[in-house]
Amino acid sequence: MIRPAAPIAALIAALALGGAATVAVPPARTDVPAAGSRATAVLAGGCFWGVEAVFERLAGVESVDSGYAGGSAGDARYDIVSAQRSRHAEAVRIVYDPRRISYATLLRVFFAVAHDPTQIDRQGPDVGPSYRSAIFPADAAQARVARAYIAQLDAARVFARPLATRIETGHFYPAEAYHQDFMARHPDHPYIRAHDVPKVRALARTFPALLRG
């Protein structure tokens, strides 16, 4: 799969800005207690290429996989999901060490730089329910923290519009091999340069202390 090339005007604008516009997102007031050396978070924020690239750069994150969440195993294929014929969202599965980075910190990065959480069923040029903003908690503790954080951000009017992020249930299914580590393997792809490089730059600018050494 090769996504359509971004319009040249959008590409030039993104490169000229040197990064994505970001919102000053405060830390969550509640967090999941650190327990054990490994935990998993599943987040959906539009095209998984850029979301994966953001979280791969965080210290304490062990692995990030692109995939599909919210639908059935039989429909977890790109041709079906991208045609909006399933209930899936493009998502990433993040395996992390909660002793080094917390669940609430992952959510803060998610809301601040990984995507625009106010867009409904779309992200930038990508339109449809598979590009929705969603959190798929692994357990009740994650669900409680996610709901509380969304309520906190909305109450503080951190964003100009209400958050569209949904709290959902559903299994995660890894995407096809050619989607994995897409930005690392195709750094000059027009879509990556226009829409995902700015996210990575915004991460470095906004959360330098969270980056891998």
Image: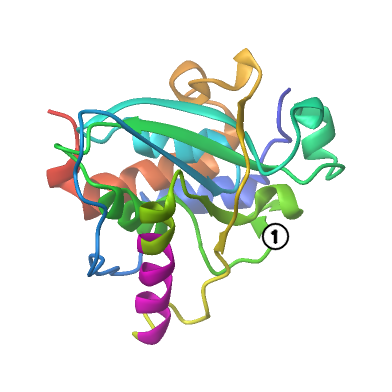
Please give the residue where the numbered disc 1 appears in the rendered image. 121
Is residue 26 shown above or below 146? below
Left or right: residue 168 versus residue 107 is: right
Chief secondary structure of the magenta portion: helix
Residues drawn in magenta: 145-155
Q: Estimate the x, y position of residue 202 in percent, counting from the top left.
A: 32, 51
Q: Is residue 116 visible from the viewing direction of this image? A: yes
In the depicted view, which residue is nearer to us: 174 or 11? 174
Residue 149 painted magenta: yes
> Hey, what amino acid is under mark 1?
Asp
Bin the neighbour count of mark 1 within 10 Å (Cα to Cα): few under 14, some 14-19, many 20 and up. some
Is residue 58 shown above or below 181? below
Residue 173 painted magenta: no
User: Which residue is found at the position 59% from the left and 51% from the top?
Assistant: 10
Q: Estimate the x, y position of residue 196 in percent, counting from the top left.
A: 48, 41
The picture quadrant where one finds residue 38 is: top left
Q: Is residue 21 visible from the viewing direction of this image? A: no
Q: Residue most toward the front? A: 140
In the depicted view, which residue is nearer to us: 124 or 87? 87
Q: Estimate the x, y position of residue 20 in percent, counting from the top left.
A: 41, 55
In the depicted view, which residue is nearer to us: 49 or 156? 156
User: Which residue is found at the position 64% from the left and 55% from the top?
Assistant: 132
